[in-house]
Image (tube, rainbow, N blue to C red):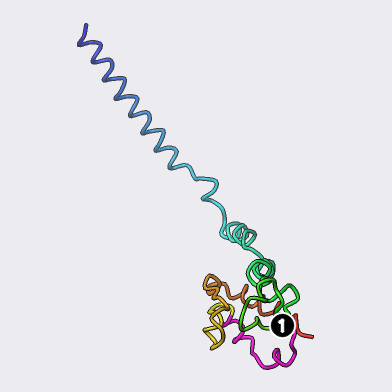
Amino acid sequence: MMRATLSMILAFLFFGACASLEAESKKSNTPNADATQTSSETSTSVEAEAPDPAAEASAIYASRCVGCHGSAGKGDGAAAASLSPKPRDYSNSVWQSSVTDSLLAKAIVGGGSAIGKSALMPANADLADKPLVVAELVKIIRGFAN
């Protein structure tokens, strides 16, 4: 009796395992709906998820730059009073005409010391691989010109 019960249990386990493997095999041979997306559908969804560089730059200016440079770019942010040298006044047209966009981009990414200015201007190394966001930050700075 014990031998018969043991044989039935082993047979059940064996056939159950075979059925499970067969079901798994059929499942893996069935094309996955996600995997059958065309490349244009995939790229569209990726593009839709990509942040707008102008919006990202605006948020970065508000969170990282306003404290020193102020919301109007005049170098009069809340932290400016305690800084020496004072933050750059972006509204100064003489200064605006004296710097290139590439120099501004270098200062944004590398900080003040990257362009021979104050090390108090921090680097934004996380933007090194976001040239469109940096370009939008440069546009924001240029927009402060009188």
Instruction: Tell me the kind of residue under disc 1.
Output: Arg
- Tell me the chief SS of the magenta region: helix
Tell me the magenta residue range.
90-107
Please check the rendered image and state whether residue 66 is part of the magenta-colored stretch, yes or no: no
Image quadrant holding the N terminus, namely: top left
- In percent of width and height, residue 38 lies at 57, 56
Q: Residue at x 60, y 81 (%)?
A: 105
So how many labels did they put on this image? 1
Mark 1 = which residue? 142
Image quadrant where residue 7 sits: top left
User: Residue at 73% of width from left, 80% of height from top?
Assistant: 74
Specify the quadrant of the image occupied by residue 118. Answer: bottom right
Comparing 121 with 62, the one in front is: 121
Q: Which quadrant would residue 92 be assigned to in this image?
A: bottom right
Mark 1 crowdedness (10 Å alpha carbons): few <14, some 14-19, many ≥20: some
> Which residue: 28% across, 20% down?
11
Q: Residue furthest right?
A: 146
- Is residue 106 located in the magenta-colored stretch of the structure? yes
Looking at this view, name the residue that lies furthest to the front: 82
The location of residue 122, given as percent across then percent down, is 55, 75
Q: Please identify the residue farthest to the left as the structure is shown.
A: 3
Picture coordinates of residue 36 (x, y %)?
A: 53, 51
Picture quarter with the C terminus: bottom right
Specify whether 29 is left or right of 127.
left
In depth, the one of 43 and 120 nearer the eye is 120
